Structure formats: structure tokens, C-alpha cells
Image (spheres, grey):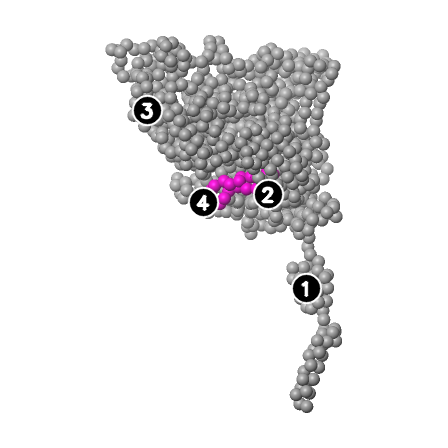
């Protein structure tokens, strides 16, 4: 009996224990058992599904997308969720920057200046954009696009877009907005800035096709490896189609005055000029723009990127006077001061040793490489003003200075500057090291060709030219430019006096004219470099002349071609070597010669055109190597250096990784609170 | 001639003068060896658009520079009369709009600087004359020469540094006056027209000292809530504007005080030797009354002339002070326009300056009649 009893007892016990839970109801606690919920009950033993949560960005946007939340409610909910709430004596939710010049427009499709771009990059988005990779390099990262495919013929790009992007007025962004935006760039043709050339070179309106809300395609006129980088520039920004159309002003032609074209279409440029609410999908909106005074940006709470805002207000104060900016930065009235180079050592130790610079107490000094090139353009077909002709003659009908017999037929049919030996000699007569080290206080790094260091295909270049007056003089001598002209007889275009061979004493000049060297007033660096090369050339028997010109006059001389050597610079528009090689060294016929050097080298054109359309890395490398070899034998520029700057900021500013192209994105910045 | 008749006649005379100014400036612009089309596109004039034209060529067409000069002038004058003063290539907006913003800034600053400078110069001039060759006279004349000799930009930068950034320098002033310092370091802001945490509506007069009283509900920005919600009074706005105006106006005032002191001193010394002053003294009138009532009033007549020119001078001086203190007024506008050869803007600034100058001289002429009843409006 004993075993049977034990088994029966155990079974009863097991069954009883199963029902024990049902019988013991008085000890259970109902409640929310999710520790992340607002009403989490630590004592709850039974989840009664009553959990409530604070709204999140995702939940608000889902409600808004589902039409269960109004725009105003969504906007204020998102503001409560995303706004910076830090406090401190340094206003940690606010950044004040002092800048030198005002923006020209916030219309991304007609802006071509950095001051406008700085705002546009924060108010509008592009499909891709430039960012720093943390190692000083610039990379292209997806933004409104999640990716793209390219057709086998390399002509058609099909883009996939994010589906969670809203304009700041709550309108959903779709492929229709993108297609409209790019159509607008080309059709409006940027009347003020001409920036539309960047897109016009690749596609026309008929190449744009909307597929569905998140897909569209663009067919290029010819393959272009740099296409994605061109649309990462602000000219590729996406604007709100509906708002633009609602504010577009179209004037029809008046039939009564048929002979006068009175039709016009502003493509909503007048409305877009100040980027009102709803214009873009970027992280910020334009709160106010007091011309020539300040620009204030505040958050677009509907911004699609995850996370809160560290900066609730960004103010750009326009202060042209350097001493005022310096005082304001010292005084704590500005977080960024756009300091002049000569003022920077006040905040940095070890300043002369650029890469190892460190900030003094309270400041961070960082050495940064940029893609800005400092150069001197050499004009192969210089002109001179005709007698009585004004230098502001916009017809540019001044006469060519013909002072050399290029085809050896006994007549002067070209200019000495058309001779590559002369330009090579000039390139050897420039003191690169002094310019980089002294003139630019070490803030100019060596670069040996049009492509900046750190850029794609920079390995196709190496040092060829250096400061060597012996080579410079020998190059001229070998090319037949011997010392034979009476220097005092030289003019810009007049016939020189040739000194009889027996009467020459070695003080004669080698070239039959005076070379005009141009720098612009106010740019002390260019003026110093112009002085240096004038001195060097003088020492090898080349006469020069050059005063610093007011900016407007400098530009006029450039355009009317009335110069031989012109100091200038280039900041890139987009991240492709073609944005350097073509404007620098391609001929006007090949879409280049932005510097008015009148340079034409057919073989170089051929290589650059092929490199432009090639999408094969190895082939492009070879083509750019060929181009460099050709160009160094026939240079049209002195490539002086690549701008490297020291950035100075306060220690409480935490910035995003530096990118040598593009502007600061304030959503990625933080300002640490100071007690 | 009645006063109204005189004013109308002088106003009508403004028309040929303004036409003359427009022809003169147009001619100067043609002679200047620079090209506004090139200035507009800068270093990227060579980029070629889809129409096959370079940026430069497109600008030439857009600005009408491909037309003969006389046609350009006729078009300009016609547009001018129709209220279209052209588009500024520097500021990317209509010239008239830019001038409407810039003129009140300069006028406000100029008038306030005159309001500070004239009393200072006249008072010091009176004391210098009264205490001729005494220590005060010697010292004030020395200071006057010093202030006249010092470049205005240097004065501006010194005041900016001392009064704008140095802690404690002006504590006594700020304690005595309701100019509570909220800038870091000093007691006066070193740049700008007002605290950047609030804005003035575009619909105002442009004179912030006036607009500060007509803003509907003055509020400041609260960065924590990202809203304009910190309530402020009209007086707060007015005092903040005044505080921002102080350094540029004080600079201009100090720069003009020296000259005024010397004018007033010389004028008063001359008047003090007149028979009617001697007669007044002989009649036993107190010396204070002789100086203030009989001498100073007569000595002020030539000073009124200077007042007219001083308005023009203040606008000229504004070129540097506006640049240093970041006031986007007429002076700074003129400099920017000249640098970029912004032809429409140069013409606009010149015309407005000429009009201001002519009107201020008209006011001076009217003032003569008030100060000196012997002057007739003819």
C-alpha cells in the first residue's frame, strides 16, 4: 500500500500546484511591465497592456504620415522631442559665426558663392553630399537617395529615394520633386550665377523620367564618371515642386507688341530667393535674413535624419572688418570668427609647424587640407589695347600682340607666350618654396599639377617644376630667346630695338616685349608673388610690368585678355578631377579655358575628353597621366600650391569631421555646456 | 519772398542738379577701366553655358552693355524716372530696395553723431573762447588737433577695444546710466545695430530708434524653447539700439568735435570784440548773459553753415565707421559698389547722397533766417 499511497499523494500535490495560481488571485498585480514606459509598474506581475510612452520622432512621423496628426501638432511634438535643452553660460544651444560676406541668394539653383552655399547646404538636401571621412578626406555619401544603378552603356542612372522625407512645411518629398528640381536648374539656367553649367553639361530636361514616388532616372548626354559628384553640389538640391509652382511667375507675350519678346518665367526664383518655409528638406529653415547684417537658421523639426538637435539657433553675422571679427571672437561674442591668417597665431601654439599646431587654452587649432589651388595663369595669346581704345571695351576687339615668327616665314604671326619654352621658363622662375613657406606662412602645400593632393587620380602627377633660374635661362636660350633687345625700348606691343651683336653687353632683354603680371589689390599674397616672379624674370633678362589692379579692373583685363601672367585661384565645384583639368587646361572648344589663357593643345584636349567620359578607373588613370605628361611639356599655368589652413575654434565646439569640399552641416555640430 | 515759395524754388532747382549728378557719375563710370560684366562673374567668367555663351557674354547682354553708351544712359534715366533704379549686381537686389534699407542706417547714425558732436564742440568752443589762452583753452585746443589728426578708423578701433571689450572700464558709466551691459567683457557692443536675439520688422521706418517704439509686441528669442517668447519692453529695444549706436556715433562725434571747437572758439572771439557786446557789457549786463545771449547767438550763425556740410561729412565718415561696426549703411554700400563696379548702385548712392546734401543745405538756409533775422530768403 505504501508505494500506491505515495504515488497518489504526489499526483494530488502536482495537480494542486497547477491550480494554485488560479486560487491565489489576491496576490497578483496588474500593470505595465515595460521598464521603458512612462507608467512602468515595478510591482506588476501581470501585464495589462496599459503601457504608455512619450511620443518619439518615429511615432510622430508615422502618425503624421497616416494623417492622424496635423502638421502643427507634429511640428510642436517634434520640437519638444528634438530640441536642445542644455543650459550654460555659453548658450550651448546656439552658435554664432562671424563671416565676411553676405549670401547672394538661397535659391540653390542660382547660387554659386560659398556664403550662399553655407546656408543652402543646411536648408536643402541633395541626393548625395560630401562629408569628411575622419581622416581629412572627402567622401560622397547618400542622403535623399538610398542608392542608384547605372545602365550598361553608362548613360542612364536610376535612383532610389528615401520614402520618409518631408519638406519643412510638411509636404512629402517624392521623385516628382527631384525631377522637377533638376528640370528647373536647366530651364531657369541660373540667370545670375551661371552655375547651371554643372548640370547642363550632363543632361537636358528630356533625359529626366519619373518612374514612381521613390524612383526616377536620368539619361546623360554622354557617359561621365563624375556625374554623382556634380549632383552632390548644391545645384543638385531638391526643392518643393508644389510650392514652387504656386509661386512661379510666368508672363505671356503681348500679341499687341509682337516684335518685342515680353514673355518671362521666373521659375519661382523670386519666392525661392530667401528659401521660405517649405522650400527644402534640410535640417534647418531660414528664420530671418537681414541683408548684409545677419542670417539666422532654426531647426526644421520635420528633418528626416534621426536624432535630436544640438543647435537650436545658428546665427551668421556679416562683419567685413577683420579687426572687429577678431575682437568679437576674443570677447566671446562669436564661436567662429573667420580670422585672418595673421591673427590666428594669437590662439595657437606651434603655429609655424602646421600639422602639429595646438590651440592655446580655451581654443582648438587644427591643420586642414583644402582642395583650393593657388595658381598663375599664362596667356598664350595676349592682346593690347589699340590706340585710343578704352580698357573697359567689352567688345574685346583689342589687337593681338604679334611679336614672334612661329611658322618661320619671316612675319610676326604669333606671340612669344605661345612658345612652350617661354612658359616653361616662367614656371622655373617662380620661387615655390618661398611662396608656400613665407608668403602663405606655411599654409600652402606643394601640388604639382591641376589635381589637388588627396583628390582622385592625384597619383598621376609628380614634381616637374621647381625654382631654378639656371634651367629657366637655359630653356629660353635653347629656344633662341637670346639677350638681344634694348630693354629700355620695350613696350607691351611695340617693336623693340635690337642691339647689334657687337654692342651687346649682357644687359639686354630676351623677349621683345614687357610681360604684364596681374594681381589684384587687397590680395597681399598675390601681390607678393607677382613681385617675386617679376624680380626673377628680370634677373634672366625678361622685362615685366605689373601693378596691383582694383578687383574690377583685374577682372576686366582677364576677360579682355590684356595680360601675360595672372595670379588667381580655384575652389572646386565638385569632387572629380575633370573639375580641375577642364577649366585649367582644356581649350575653349573643349569646354575649358575658364582662365582665359587661350590655350589649345589638341592632344591634351583629346586625353581630357576621353578621361571625362571614361568610367574605367585604369583607363582614366592612364589618360590623366598622359595629360600631365603633355601639360608639363607645354604648361599654361604655374601651379603654386594647395591651400592648407589652420582652423581655430573654441574648445566647447564639437564639430563634424572636416571635409575639404562642401560646407559645415550644423546638425552634426554640438556645443558643450559651460557652467 | 515767402518761406514756402523759397522752398519750392529750391526743390525745383534740385532737378537739374540731380540730372547733372547723374550725367557726371555716368560719365565717370564709363571712363573707369573696369567692366561690370566681368566683375559680376568674377574668376568663373569663362564657364560656358548651354546657350554657348560664356558667363561673361551672358552678363554683357543682361546688363545691356552691348548697347551704345548713349542708349545705356537714356535707358537708365527713363528707368530712373519710372522708379526702376536697376538691379544691384553686388547685392543681388533692386537698387531702390537696398538704398531704402541703407539710407536710414546712415542717417540715424549721422544725426545722432551730430547730436553728440555739436553740443560737445560748441560747449568746448565757448569755454575755450571765454578762457582764452588759459590752461583749459590750451588743453582743449591740443585735444582738438589730436582728434582731428587721428584717422577715424583708428579712433573707432580704439573705442571698440577700450569701451567694447575691457572689463570694468566703464562700470561707473553703466552704473549711472540704464545701459546695462550684456556683452562679454565691455560695456558697449562692438558691432551690429541691435542684439541678434531679436529682429525688427521690415515694415518699419528703418530708423531703429523710432521702430523700437512701434514694434507690436517686442520679443526676444529663447534658444531653449526655440521661440521668440521672452517679452521685452519698447524701452529695452530703444536702449539696446542706442547702446549699439553709441560707439560708431561717439567715434564720428569725437572726430568732428575738434573742428567744431575751433570754429566756435574763433567765431565767438570775433563776436566778443563787436561793439554790441561792448555795449551790453557797458550797460552792466552780467558776463554770463552777455556771452550766452548776445555773443553766442551771433557766433552760432557761421556754425549753422558747418552743420549743413557736417551732414555730408558724417555720411563720408560713415564709410569707415560703418565698415568697422558692421552697419550696412550708405557708406559701406558705396564702398562695396565701387569695389565691384556696381554701376547701378554707384549711381543710386550718388544720387541719394546728393539729394541728402542738397536738402540739408536747404535746411541750413532756412535755419539762417531763424538764427539771424537780418538774413532774407532770396
Please check the rendered image and state whether residue A416 is part of the magenta-colored stretch, yes or no.
no
Residue at image mark 2 = A146
- Secondary element under disc 4, as helix, strand or loop, is strand
Q: Quadrant for the N terminus of chain A, please.
A: bottom right
Mark 4 and mark 1 lie on one chain; the one further toward the N terminus is: 1
Instruction: Please tell me if label 3 and label 4 are on a single chain.
Output: yes
Chain to which mark 4 belongs? A
Residue at image mark 3 = A472
Q: Nearer the viewer, mark 2 or mark 1?
A: 2
Kindly report the distance in space between the C-alpha atoms of the residues bearing marks 3 and 1. 84 Å
Query: How crowded is the residue under tag 3: few (<14 C-alpha within 10 Å), some, or many (20+)?
Result: many
In the rendered structure, which segment of residues is drawn in magenta? A125-142
Q: Nearer the viewer, mark 4 or mark 1?
A: 1
Looking at the image, is A69 positioned above or below residue A373? below
Looking at the image, is B16 positioned above or below residue B128? above
Please check the rendered image and state whether residue A135 is part of the magenta-colored stretch, yes or no.
yes
Instruction: Please tell me if label 4 and label 1 are on a single chain.
Output: yes
Q: Which mark is residue A33?
A: 1
Pick the front one: A672 or B217: A672
Mark 2 and mark 4 lie on one chain; the one further toward the N terminus is: 2
Chain to which mark 2 belongs? A
Mark 2 and mark 3 lie on one chain; the one further toward the N terminus is: 2
Kindly report the distance in space between the C-alpha atoms of the residues bearing marks 2 and 1. 38 Å
Tag 2 and tag 3, C-beta contact below 8 Å: no
Kindly report the distance in space between the C-alpha atoms of the residues bearing marks 3 and 4. 42 Å
Amino acid at each position: 500500500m505504501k508505494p500506491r499511497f505515495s504515488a497518489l499523494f504526489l499526483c494530488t500535490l502536482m495537480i494542486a500546484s497547477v491550480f494554485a495560481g488560479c486560487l491565489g488571485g489576491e496576490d497578483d498585480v496588474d500593470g505595465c511591465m515595460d521598464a521603458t514606459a512612462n507608467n512602468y509598474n515595478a510591482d506588476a506581475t501581470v501585464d495589462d497592456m496599459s503601457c504608455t510612452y512619450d511620443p518619439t520622432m518615429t511615432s510622430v512621423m508615422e502618425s503624421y504620415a497616416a494623417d492622424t496628426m496635423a502638421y502643427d501638432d507634429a511640428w510642436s511634438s517634434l520640437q519638444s522631442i528634438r530640441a536642445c535643452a542644455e543650459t550654460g553660460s555659453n548658450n550651448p544651444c546656439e552658435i554664432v559665426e562671424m563671416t565676411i560676406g553676405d549670401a547672394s541668394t538661397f535659391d540653390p539653383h542660382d547660387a554659386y558663392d560659398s556664403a550662399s552655399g553655407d546656408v543652402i547646404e543646411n536648408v536643402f538636401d541633395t541626393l548625395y553630399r560630401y562629408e569628411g571621412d575622419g581622416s581629412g578626406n572627402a567622401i560622397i555619401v547618400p542622403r535623399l537617395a538610398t542608392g542608384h544603378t547605372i545602365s550598361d552603356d553608362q548613360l542612364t542612372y536610376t535612383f532610389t529615394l528615401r520614402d520618409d522625407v518631408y519638406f519643412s512645411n510638411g509636404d512629402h518629398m517624392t521623385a516628382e520633386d527631384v525631377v522637377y528640381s533638376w528640370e528647373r536648374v536647366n530651364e531657369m539656367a541660373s540667370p545670375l550665377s551661371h552655375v547651371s553649367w554643372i548640370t547642363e553639361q550632363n543632361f537636358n530636361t528630356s533625359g529626366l523620367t519619373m518612374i514612381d514616388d521613390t524612383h526616377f532616372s536620368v539619361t546623360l548626354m554622354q557617359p561621365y564618371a563624375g556625374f554623382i559628384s556634380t549632383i552632390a553640389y548644391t545645384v543638385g538640391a531638391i526643392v518643393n515642386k508644389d510650392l514652387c509652382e504656386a509661386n512661379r511667375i510666368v508672363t505671356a507675350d503681348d500679341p499687341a507688341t509682337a516684335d518685342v519678346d515680353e514673355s518671362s518665367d521666373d521659375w519661382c526664383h523670386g519666392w525661392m530667393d530667401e528659401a521660405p518655409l517649405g522650400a527644402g528638406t534640410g535640417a534647418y529653415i531660414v528664420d530671418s535674413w537681414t541683408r548684409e547684417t545677419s542670417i539666422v537658421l532654426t531647426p526644421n523639426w520635420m528633418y528626416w535624419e534621426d536624432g535630436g538637435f544640438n543647435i537650436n539657433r545658428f546665427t551668421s553675422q556679416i562683419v567685413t572688418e577683420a579687426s572687429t571679427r577678431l575682437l568679437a571672437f576674443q570677447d566671446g561674442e562669436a564661436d567662429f570668427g573667420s580670422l585672418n591668417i595673421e591673427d590666428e597665431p594669437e590662439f595657437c601654439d606651434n603655429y609655424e609647424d602646421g600639422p602639429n599646431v595646438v590651440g592655446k587654452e580655451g581654443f582648438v587649432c587644427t591643420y586642414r587640407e583644402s582642395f583650393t589651388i593657388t595658381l598663375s595663369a599664362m596667356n598664350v595669346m595676349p592682346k593690347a589695347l589699340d590706340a585710343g581704345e578704352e580698357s573697359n571695351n567689352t567688345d574685346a576687339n583689342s589687337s593681338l600682340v604679334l611679336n614672334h615668327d612661329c611658322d618661320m616665314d619671316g612675319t610676326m604671326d604669333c606671340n612669344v607666350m605661345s612658345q612652350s619654352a617661354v612658359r616653361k621658363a616662367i614656371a622655373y622662375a617662380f620661387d615655390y618654396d618661398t611662396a608656400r613657406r613665407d608668403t602663405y606662412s606655411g599654409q600652402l602645400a606643394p601640388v604639382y599639377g591641376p589635381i589637388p593632393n588627396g583628390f582622385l587620380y592625384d597619383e598621376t602627377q609628380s614634381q616637374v617644376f621647381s625654382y631654378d633660374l639656371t634651367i629657366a635661362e637655359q630653356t629660353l636660350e635653347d629656344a633662341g630667346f637670346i639677350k638681344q633687345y634694348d630693354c629700355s625700348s620695350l613696350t607691351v606691343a611695340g617693336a623693340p630695338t635690337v642691339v647689334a651683336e657687337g654692342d651687346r653687353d649682357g644687359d639686354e632683354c630676351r623677349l621683345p616685349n614687357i610681360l604684364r603680371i596681374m594681381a589684384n589689390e587687397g590680395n597681399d599674397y598675390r601681390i607678393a608673388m607677382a613681385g617675386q616672379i617679376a624680380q626673377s624674370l628680370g634677373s634672366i633678362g625678361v622685362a615685366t610690368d605689373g601693378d596691383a589692379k582694383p578687383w574690377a579692373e583685374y577682372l576686366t583685363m582677364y576677360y579682355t585678355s590684356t595680360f601675360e601672367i595672372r595670379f588667381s585661384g580655384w575652389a572646386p565645384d565638385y569632387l572629380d578631377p575633370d573639375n580641375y583639368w577642364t577649366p585649367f587646361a582644356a581649350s575653349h572648344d573643349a569646354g575649358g579655358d575658364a582662365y582665359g589663357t587661350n590655350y589649345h593643345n589638341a592632344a591634351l584636349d583629346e586625353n581630357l575628353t576621353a578621361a571625362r567620359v571614361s568610367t574605367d578607373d585604369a583607363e582614366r588613370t592612364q589618360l590623366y597621366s598622359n595629360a600631365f605628361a603633355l601639360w608639363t611639356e607645354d604648361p599654361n599655368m604655374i601651379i603654386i600650391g594647395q591651400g592648407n589652413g589652420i582652423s581655430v575654434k573654441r574648445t566647447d565646439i564639437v564639430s563634424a569631421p572636416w571635409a575639404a569640399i562642401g560646407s559645415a552641416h550644423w546638425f552634426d555640430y554640438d556645443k558643450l555646456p559651460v557652467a | 519772398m515767402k518761406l514756402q515759395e523759397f522752398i519750392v524754388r529750391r526743390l525745383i532747382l534740385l532737378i537739374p542738379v540731380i540730372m547733372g549728378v547723374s550725367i557726371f557719375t555716368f560719365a565717370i563710370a564709363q571712363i573707369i577701366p573696369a567692366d561690370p560684366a566681368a566683375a559680376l562673374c568674377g574668376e568663373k567668367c569663362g564657364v560656358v553655358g548651354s546657350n554657348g555663351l560664356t558667363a561673361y557674354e551672358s552678363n554683357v547682354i543682361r546688363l545691356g552693355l552691348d548697347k551704345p553708351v548713349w542708349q545705356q544712359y537714356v535707358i537708365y534715366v527713363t528707368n530712373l524716372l519710372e522708379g526702376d533704379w536697376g538691379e544691384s549686381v553686388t547685392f543681388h537686389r533692386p537698387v531702390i530696395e537696398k538704398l531704402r534699407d541703407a539710407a536710414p542706417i546712415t542717417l540715424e547714425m549721422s544725426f545722432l553723431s551730430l547730436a553728440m558732436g555739436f553740443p560737445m564742440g560748441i560747449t568746448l568752443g565757448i569755454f575755450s573762447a571765454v578762457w582764452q589762452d588759459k590752461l583749459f583753452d590750451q588743453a582743449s585746443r591740443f585735444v582738438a588737433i589730436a582728434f582731428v589728426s587721428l584717422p577715424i578708423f583708428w579712433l573707432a578701433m580704439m573705442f571698440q577695444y577700450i569701451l567694447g571689450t575691457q572689463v570694468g572700464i566703464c562700470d561707473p558709466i553703466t552704473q549711472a546710466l540704464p545701459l546695462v551691459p550684456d556683452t562679454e567683457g565691455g560695456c558697449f557692443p562692438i558691432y551690429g545695430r541691435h542684439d541678434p536675439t531679436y529682429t525688427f520688422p521690415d515694415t518699419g521706418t528703418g530708423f531703429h530708434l523710432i521702430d523700437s517704439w512701434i514694434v507690436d509686441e517686442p520679443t526676444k528669442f529663447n534658444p531653449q524653447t526655440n521661440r521668440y517668447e521672452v517679452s521685452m519692453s519698447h524701452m529695452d529695444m530703444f536702449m539696446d539700439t542706442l547702446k549699439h549706436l553709441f560707439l560708431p556715433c561717439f567715434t564720428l562725434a569725437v572726430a568732428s568735435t575738434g573742428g567744431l571747437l575751433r570754429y566756435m572758439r574763433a567765431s565767438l572771439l570775433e563776436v566778443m570784440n563787436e561793439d554790441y557786446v561792448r555795449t551790453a557789457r557797458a550797460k552792466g549786463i552780467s558776463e554770463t548773459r552777455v556771452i550766452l545771449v548776445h555773443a553766442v547767438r551771433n557766433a552760432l550763425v557761421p556754425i549753422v553753415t558747418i552743420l549743413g556740410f557736417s551732414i555730408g561729412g558724417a555720411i563720408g565718415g560713415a564709410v569707415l565707421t560703418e565698415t568697422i561696426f558692421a552697419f550696412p549703411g550708405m557708406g559701406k554700400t558705396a564702398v562695396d559698389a565701387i569695389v565691384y563696379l556696381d554701376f547701378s548702385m554707384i549711381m543710386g548712392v550718388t544720387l541719394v547722397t546728393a539729394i541728402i546734401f542738397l536738402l540739408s543745405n536747404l535746411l541750413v538756409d532756412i535755419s539762417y533766417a531763424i538764427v539771424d533775422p537780418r538774413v532774407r530768403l532770396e
